[in-house]
Image (cartoon, coloured by chain):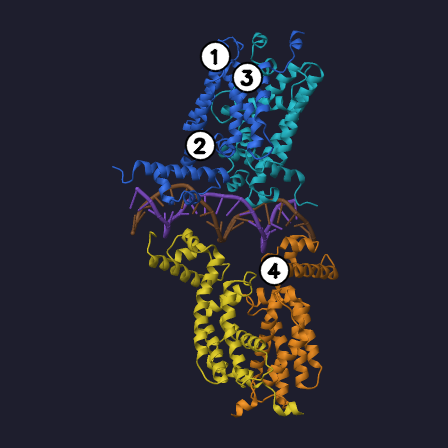
Chain colours: A orange, B yellow, C cyan, D blue, E brown, F purple
Amino acid sequence: MPVISAERMQGRIDAIIEAATSVFGAKGYEAASIAEIARRAEVSDGLIYRYFSNKRDLLYRVLEAFYERVVAALEKEAANGTTFDSRLLAIVRRHLGNFVADRELCRLFLSEVRVASDYKGSTIQNLNRRYVSVLTALIEAGIAAGEVKPDASPKLVRNVIFGAIEHIAWPYVNGDGKLDVEETAIAVTNLICGGICLPSQNKA
Amino acid sequence: MPVISAERMQGRIDAIIEAATSVFGAKGYEAASIAEIARRAEVSDGLIYRYFSNKRDLLYRVLEAFYERVVAALEKEAANGTTFDSRLLAIVRRHLGNFVADRELCRLFLSEVRVASDYKGSTIQNLNRRYVSVLTALIEAGIAAGEVKPDASPKLVRNVIFGAIEHIAWPYVNGDGKLDVEETAIAVTNLICGGICLPSQNKA
Amino acid sequence: MPVISAERMQGRIDAIIEAATSVFGAKGYEAASIAEIARRAEVSDGLIYRYFSNKRDLLYRVLEAFYERVVAALEKEAANGTTFDSRLLAIVRRHLGNFVADRELCRLFLSEVRVASDYKGSTIQNLNRRYVSVLTALIEAGIAAGEVKPDASPKLVRNVIFGAIEHIAWPYVNGDGKLDVEETAIAVTNLICGGICLPSQNKA
Amino acid sequence: MPVISAERMQGRIDAIIEAATSVFGAKGYEAASIAEIARRAEVSDGLIYRYFSNKRDLLYRVLEAFYERVVAALEKEAANGTTFDSRLLAIVRRHLGNFVADRELCRLFLSEVRVASDYKGSTIQNLNRRYVSVLTALIEAGIAAGEVKPDASPKLVRNVIFGAIEHIAWPYVNGDGKLDVEETAIAVTNLICGGICLPSQNKA
DNA sequence: CATGAATGAGTGTTCATTCAT
DNA sequence: AATGAATGAACACTCATTCAT
C-alpha cells in the first residue's frame, strides 16, 4: 500500500519529466544536471532516483513521452487522405512540422540519443519503428492500389524519405537557418514521386 | 634549424593521429583519454599539446585528414563518366563505399562532430561543403544537358540523396546490420531518377 | 528540513577551516592541496566544495574567521584606557601580540593575501579597514582632546604605525628571529609620540 | 677558451635579464613563462638554462640588477646633505621615489620575493641590508652629532621608517591610488623627527 | 516517503627543465 | 654553443548517485 496516492506520484513524475524536458532541451544532456532538474521540478535530487533509475533513463523517458505523442499524431494523420500522393504529402508535412514544433526535443533525439550506443534495443527505438512503419504501410498500400511502382522497396523508400527530411531539417534544428514546412514538403514529395530525370532521357 | 628532422616531426604527428583515430574510433570522443592516445602513439602526454592545441582539435585533425582524402577521391570520381545516370551512380556508390571502408571514422563524424556545436564554421564543415558540392555540380550539369528536369532544385536533390544515404548507412556504421553497396547504390539512384509513382496515377 | 543538524553542519565547516588553517599555514596556499585538507578534516574532497566555492574562497574564509576575532578583540581593547599614550600603547601592544599569537595566519595574510590581486574589494580588506580604523579614531580623539598635535594626519600616522609594526614583526612571522612584544611596543609608541630629534636641534 | 666572446655572452645575459624584467614585471612570477622570456630575448628556451640555473634564479638576478642600481643611488644620495633632517628627507624621498620610478620591480620584490621562503640568505637580502644600513648609519651619525636623541635605537628607527614608507607606497605600487613623493616624504620625515604628541601633554 | 548531505572517481592541460641533435 | 623537441608530474573541480536521518 503506497504511502502517497497514485495521483500524487504521477504528478511528481510528470513534474520531473517536464522539468527535465526543458533543462535537457535548453542545455543538452551532458550540460544538464540532476540538481537543476530537481530544483525546477521543486523536488529533491534523491526523489528523482525513486522514479528514474539514472540520468540516462530520465533522458529516455523524456523522449519517450515526446515520441509517444508524435507517433499517435502521425498514426492519426495517416488515417486520413484518399490518394497516395495526398497521404504521402501529409506524412512528410507532419514529419517536417515536428521539427519546427519541437525543435529542442528533436535535436536532443538526433544528437544525443539516436547516435548513442544505448539506442539499439531501447523503447525509443521501438517507438521510432512504429513511427516509420506508418510510411512503410502507406507505400505498401500504394503498391497494392497500383499507385506506386510494384518494384519499389517500401523500406528503401521510407529510409530515403526520412533520411532526406532529417538531413534537410537538421540545420534548422541545430539553430541555423529557416525551414519552410509546406514548401519543403511539396518539393520532397514531388521529387520522391516523380524522380528527377526527364523521361526523354530514359528513352534515348 | 629544427632539432629534429621534418620527417621525424611528421612521423610523430602521424603516429598521434593514427593513435587518436583508433582510440576515438573505439571509445568515442568523451571516453577516450589523452593519456591513452599518448601511450598508444608511444609519446608523452605533453607532446600531443605541441602539435594539437587540445583534445577537441585532435579529434578535428583526425577527421580532417580523413575528409581530405575522401573529398579528393570523390572529386576525382566525379571527373569520370558520361551520362548523368552513370555519374550519379558513381557518386552514390562511392559515398556508400566510404561508410564501409571507414566505418569508425564515419561514425565519429556523424555522432561526435556533425552534431556538435563547434561544427559550424569548422574546417570540417568546409570540407563537407566541398564534398557535397560535387553532387550539386553534377545535378546542375544534368539540368544544363537536358538530362535532369529543369525545375529540380540542385540543393534539394543533393540533400535528399545525402540524407537518404546516410540514413541507410547509419545502422551499419553504428555496428548493426550489413550494407550492400552496389545494390543500395543502384536502388537509391533509380529511385531518385525515376521516382516511385506510376505515370498512370499522375494522369488520373 | 535539513538532513543533518545545523550543529553537525557547522562542525563540518569548522573542521574544514581548521584543517585548511593548518595546511595552508604549514605549506602556503599554492603548495597546499584540497585533497590534503579534506583528508585532515576527515571529509571527502567534494564536500569542501559544498561549503566553499573554491580553493581561494577557502583561504579567504580561513582568514576571515581569524580577522573577525582579531578585529573584535582590538575594538574591545580600544574601549579601555584613559590617556592617549596608554591607549596607543595598548593598540600597538595588541597588534604586535597578534603576530606572536597567530604567526601562521599572519604570515598567510601578509604573504598570500594582502599581496594578491584579489585582495582589493574582498571581505578581508573590509575587515582590515575596520581594524585599522580603530587607530585612526584614537588619533582623531587624541587631536580633539589636545593630546595630539592638531596638524597630525590621522591616516598618515596610522599608516606609519601599522607599517612600522608589520615591518618589525615580519622577520619573526617568517620564522626568523624573536619578538619581544612589550619592549617593542613601548619603543615604537615612544618613537611615534616623541619623535627622534632633539628639541635643541630644531631651535638651532 | 670560450667559443663566444665574453662581450657576446654578456650581451646574451643582459638581453635575457631585460626580457625577464619586462615579462616578470608585467605578469608576475608565476604567470610568466620561460618560453615567453626566451622569445622576447630572441634566444632559445634552453639557452636561458646555460646562464641561469632555473626560473627562480632568473627572477633573483633580475631583482639583483635592479637592487644594485638602487643601492648605489641611495649610497650616493646619502653622501650629500649637511643636517640630519635634510639627509633623512633625502633618503625618504629617494626611497619613495623608487616605488614610483620602478613600480613593477618593486611590486615583484614585495609580493614575490621578500615574502618568499627563499629570501632569507639570498643575495637580495644582502643588498637589502646594504640598502637599509644607509639609514642606520645616518641615524648613528645623527646621534653622534647630537641631532638625534641618544637613546634612539638606530635599528628600530630604520625599521619604522622603511616599514612606514612601504606601507604607504604599497597601494600605489599595487596599482591603486596615487603617491605624492614630495608631500609624503616631508610628512613622514616630520612625523619621525618630531613625533605626534604635544609637549604639554607629556608634562602634565 | 522524502531529503539533501556526502561521496570520490576521473582527466585535460601547463610548463620548467633536460638533453639529443 | 645553441637549439627546441620531449618529458611527465601535479591537481582543482564536478556531479551522478547513495543512504543516513
Label 3 is found on which chain of the structure?
C
- Looking at the image, residue A105 sits to the left or right of residue B100; the answer is right
Disc 1 with disc 2 on a shared chain: yes
Residue at (54%, 75%) from the top-left corner?
B162
Residue that protrudes farthest toward the left in the picture: D1
Q: Is residue D153 visible?
A: yes
Among the 4 quarters of the image, the one containing residue A186: bottom right
What residue does disc 4 label?
A: A28
Q: Secondary structure at mark 1?
A: helix
Compared to A11, does D1 lie above or below?
A: above
Q: Which residue is mark 3?
A: C184
What residue does disc 1 label? D141
- Mark linked to residue D63: 2
Q: For the point 69% across and 20% down, which residue is it?
A: C140
Within 10 Å of disc 3 (Cα), the crowding (few <14, some 14-19, many 20+) is some
Residue A126 rendering spot, x and y as whole percentages: 60, 72
